[in-house]
Structure formats: C-alpha cells, structure tokens
C-alpha cells in the first residue's frame, strides 16, 4: 500500500514537472519516497477500502451532481424564486472519520445540499428545498459510501 | 473535437452565469452557498473539461485534469468551512428547522 | 477560435464583477468570504483559458494549481478566525 502511494506521488511529480532529465526524475523519486517514509503508516480512519466500488462511485456521483444542478438552476432562474430552505438532521450509521469525510464532501459537492456540521452519527445538512434532500433522507448516499468502505475483498 | 470543446465550454459558462445570478438573488448566506457550489462543481469543471478536450492528447491534458481534480475535491471543503463558521457564530437560515 | 476564447475571457471577467458586488455590499462578513471564494474559482479557470489562448498551458496550469492551493489555505484560515471571533462585526 505504501509502495502504491509512493508511485502515485511520483507520477504526480512527473505530470507536473514535465521535464525528464536525470536530475529532475531522480529528485522526484527521492522526494516521493521521503514523503511516504515520513508519513504514518496504516491509517485508522478507514477499515477497508474497495477500489472497484470507488471507481463506480465517481461517475454515479457526477450524474447525481448534474441532475441536482439542473434542478437548482431551474429554481434560481424561476422568477418567483420558489425556494424553501431548511436544516435537516441526518442520522447515519457511518462513524469512522474517512467515511464521514467522503459522505460530507459528496453532500456538499451536490448542488442543493450543504453539510453544515459534522459529528459521529449525525450530520446537519442545509437543503435549499424538499426535493433536494429527499434522496439523502432515503439513505442513498449512505448505502453507496458504506459499500465503498466495507467490501470484503481488497482490504488494506 | 473542437466542436465538442466549444459545447462543453458553453455548458460550463451557462452554469457559471446561473451561479452568479443566484449569488445576486438568493436571500441569505446559506442559500448563496448553494449557488457557489453550482459554480464550482459544474461550471468550472465543464469549462476545464472543454479546455482539456481542446488540448488533445498530450501532457497538458493531464495537467488540466490535475487542476480539475483539485477544484473538485477542495472547493467543497472551503464551502463547508465558511458555512460552518457562519453556523457556529450564531447565524441561522430564515426558515424552519425539521427533525 | 481566438475570438471564442476572447468571448470566454470577457464573460468570466464580467461574472467576477458580479461577485465583487457581493464582496462590497454583502450584509454579513460570511457573504464577503463566499464572494471571494467565487472570484478565486473564476480566477483559476481564467488562468487556464489565458494559457490556452497564448498556447502556454504548461506554464499557466502551474500558476493556477498554486493559486488553488493558496486559496484553500487562506479560506480555511479566514473561516477558523471568524469562527472564533463570531459574527459580531459586520
């Protein structure tokens, strides 16, 4: 796992520096391995992580963002401005930090809902109208995120 | 390829314009943050994707993708931090609060 | 294509002026912070468009990456500061 992290950092270095002399590539390799060596191993923020579910999650999230983005732009462009903002207390089963970060980030990324306050087991979400948060209240996001972090294979 | 880039950039500009209109029209801080997330997660991403398509297959495409991923992951963090500061310092949205 | 990119540049600048109105007028201090965030998102996109126009994307993308990271750090610092200070000052 740490080897993959070092390779990922090295690829990022290559993409951003875009010069392939010996000195630049060697500096990149040294710096990438140094950063991975200095950072603590084996984070306790996640239990398991499934790459396949994560790869499936990103396009699903983008479709979600597009759909609710069109909804929010219709709300904004409506001359009557039919918004009904409210604070929703959202109970969740996820408790680890990593899972909460992914869940809260996805909620904020989706137009129409914003995470206001995070605590283990409960999120306070500000929604711009009732239609924006009905998927969240039905637990669609929680299902997807917990599927990403609790798959059996591919444990770290 | 060029036409695909133009279509993507025009879609992105549409969302950017709608986000700005929302910034002017919406009543309080919490609702304005929604229009900001519209701007970030749809407008900027579509414009950057259009520019990446226009570049074609090269290292520049990868670098524009790095910027795109940065915008996609970091802007929700900023929006959440600002809104949490507003909430903790006592501002409340105008409407009711439900369980 | 150059004309189209000029059009995009002018539109982005006009939108930045809209956010600038929110920064100047905004009733609470958090409105001003949100307006600044909107301006910096536009600036990131604007830098990449300028790079495409001048065919120097490799240089301008680096600038815009640095701008995005700096914007993150400064926005988090401002949010933390205001959280302690409260919304008492308008």
Image (cartoon, coloured by chain):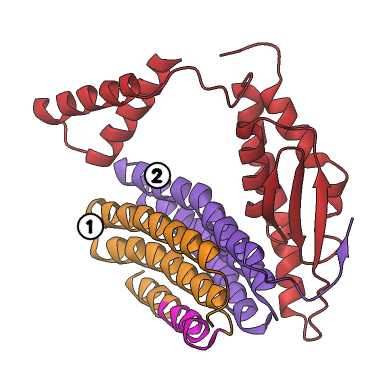
Does any portion of residue A21 appear in the rendered image? no
Chain C rendering hue: orange
Q: Which residue is mark 1?
A: C56
Chain B rendering hue: purple
Residue C51's place in the image compared with C15, above or below, is above
Label 1, label 2: how far apart the Cα atoms are: 16 Å
Question: Circle 2 sits in a helix, a strand or a loop, which is it?
Answer: helix
The residue nearer to you, when weighing A17 against A96, is A96
Chain A rendering hue: red
What is the span of residues highlighted in magenta in the rendered image?
Answer: C13-26
Question: Circle 1 sits in a helix, a strand or a loop, which is it?
Answer: loop
Query: Residue B66 bears which disc, if any?
Result: 2
- Few, some or many C-alpha atoms within 10 Å of disc 2 (few <14, some 14-19, many ≥20)? some
Which image quadrant is residue B12 in?
bottom right
Q: x, y (%) of residue B60?
A: 31, 46
Q: Is residue C18 magenta?
A: yes
Q: x, y (%) of residue B33?
A: 62, 67
């Amino acid at each position: 796992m740490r080897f993959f992290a070092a390779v990922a950092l090295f690829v990022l270095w290559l993409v951003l520096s875009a010069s392939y002399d010996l000195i630049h590539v060697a500096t990149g390799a040294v710096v990438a391995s140094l950063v991975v060596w200095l950072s603590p191993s084996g984070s306790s923020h996640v239990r398991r992580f499934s790459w396949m579910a994560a790869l499936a999650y990103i396009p699903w999230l983008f479709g979600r963002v597009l759909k609710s983005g069109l909804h929010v732009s219709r709300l904004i462009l409506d001359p009557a401005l039919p918004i009904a903002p409210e604070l929703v207390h959202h109970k969740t089963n996820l408790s680890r930090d990593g899972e909460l970060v992914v869940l809260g980030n996805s909620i904020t990324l989706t137009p129409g809902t914003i995470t206001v306050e995070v605590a283990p087991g409960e999120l306070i979400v500000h929604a711009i109208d009732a239609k924006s948060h009905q998927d969240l209240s039905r637990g669609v996001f929680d299902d997807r995120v917990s599927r990403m972090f609790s798959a059996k294979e591919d444990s770290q | 390829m060029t036409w695909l880039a133009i279509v993507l950039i025009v879609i992105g500009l549409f969302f950017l314009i709608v986000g700005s209109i929302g910034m002017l029209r919406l009543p309080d801080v919490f609702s304005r943050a929604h229009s900001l997330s519209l701007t970030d997660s749809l407008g900027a991403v579509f414009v950057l994707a259009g520019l990446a398509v226009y570049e074609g297959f090269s290292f520049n495409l990868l670098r524009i993708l790095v910027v795109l991923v940065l915008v996609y992951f970091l802007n929700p963090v900023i929006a959440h931090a600002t809104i949490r500061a507003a909430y903790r310092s006592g501002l409340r949205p105008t409407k009711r609060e439900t369980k | 294509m150059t004309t189209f990119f000029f059009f995009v540049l002018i539109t982005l600048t006009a939108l930045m002026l809209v956010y600038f109105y929110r920064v100047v007028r905004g009733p609470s201090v958090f409105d001003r912070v949100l307006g600044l965030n909107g301006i910096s998102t536009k600036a990131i996109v604007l830098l990449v468009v300028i790079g495409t126009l001048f065919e120097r994307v490799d240089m301008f993308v680096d600038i815009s990456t640095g701008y995005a990271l700096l914007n993150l750090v400064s926005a988090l610092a401002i949010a933390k500061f205001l959280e302690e200070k409260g919304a008492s000052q308008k």
